[in-house]
Structures are given as C-alpha cells and as structure tokens.
Amino acid sequence: MYMQKKRSSKEKHLGDVIDKLLKAYNLEDKMKELDLLEAWPDLMGKAVAHRTKSIEIKNQKLLLKIDSSVMREQLHIGKQVIIQRVNEFMGKDVIKDVWFS
C-alpha cells in the first residue's frame, strides 16, 4: 500500500515557481506579448489579423506591420481603440502608442 507523503512547508507549486522565474528573468511581458499574438484575431477581427504580418511591443509602443496601405490608414484612424483593447487584454497599461509600417 502506497502512502502519500505530506508536503513540507518549503515545497512550492510548479505554477508558483514558474511565475517567480518569469518575474526574475523579466519574461512576464514577453509571455503576455505571445498571448497577444494568439488573441489578435479575436481582438481586432479576422480581416485585420490576416493583413497583420508582425506584432511587437517596444518602449510602450505597439509596432504593427500591415501589408495593406488602406488597412494601415483605417487602423491609424482607430489607434485609440487598438490601445484600449490591447491594454484591457494585457490587464494593465502596456501600450501608449501604435506605429504602423
């Protein structure tokens, strides 16, 4: 018969350890950036997602590479909506501006 050993107070849950590692190596924001890439079609719609060739976050700027000049212009007009949606998704104010190329 196998008896389960009780956890000592020093043992940690794997999720807690991973969270600490992400914080220690400043990878939390990179992980959220990956989540943003995955959620982009839901946040902005399939048409925008299809035209988006790359997404990057640098210095509180969302850098978007869009392959359509018409789409770039439309998105530029709605920059504040993009900033709001991304910040809501991230759970904090990560983005202050959006740049298009």
Image: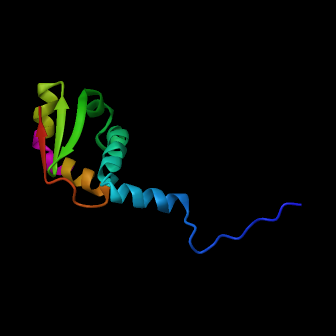
Segment colored magenta: 76-81
Q: Quadrant of residue 100?
A: top left
At a point 43% along the width and 59% down the height, the residue shown is 19
Q: Nearer the viewer, residue 74 or 7?
A: 7
Residue 90, compared with residue 7, is above or below; it is: above
Q: Residue furthest bottom?
A: 9
Q: Main secondary structure of the magenta part?
A: helix
Q: Nearer the viewer, residue 50 or 37?
A: 37
Answer left or right for 14 relative to 70: right
Q: Magenta includes 79?
A: yes
Q: Quadrant of the N terminus?
A: bottom right
Residue 70, compared with residue 26, is above or below; it is: above
Total number of numbered discs in the rendering: 0
Answer left or right for 18 relative to 73: right
At a point 21% along the width and 45% down the height, the residue shown is 57
At a point 36% along the width and 43% down the height, the residue shown is 39
Asked which colour scheme the image uses, the reply is rainbow
Q: Quadrant of residue 14?
A: bottom right
Q: Magenta includes 64?
A: no
> Picture coordinates of residue 29 (x, y %)?
30, 52
Q: Nearer the viewer, residue 38 or 30?
A: 30
Q: Quadrant of the C terminus?
A: top left
At a point 10% along the width and 34% down the height, the residue shown is 73
> Picture coordinates of residue 60 (x, y %)?
16, 52
Answer left or right for 37 relative to 51: right
> Picture coordinates of residue 72 (x, y %)?
13, 32
> Picture coordinates of residue 94 (x, y %)?
22, 56
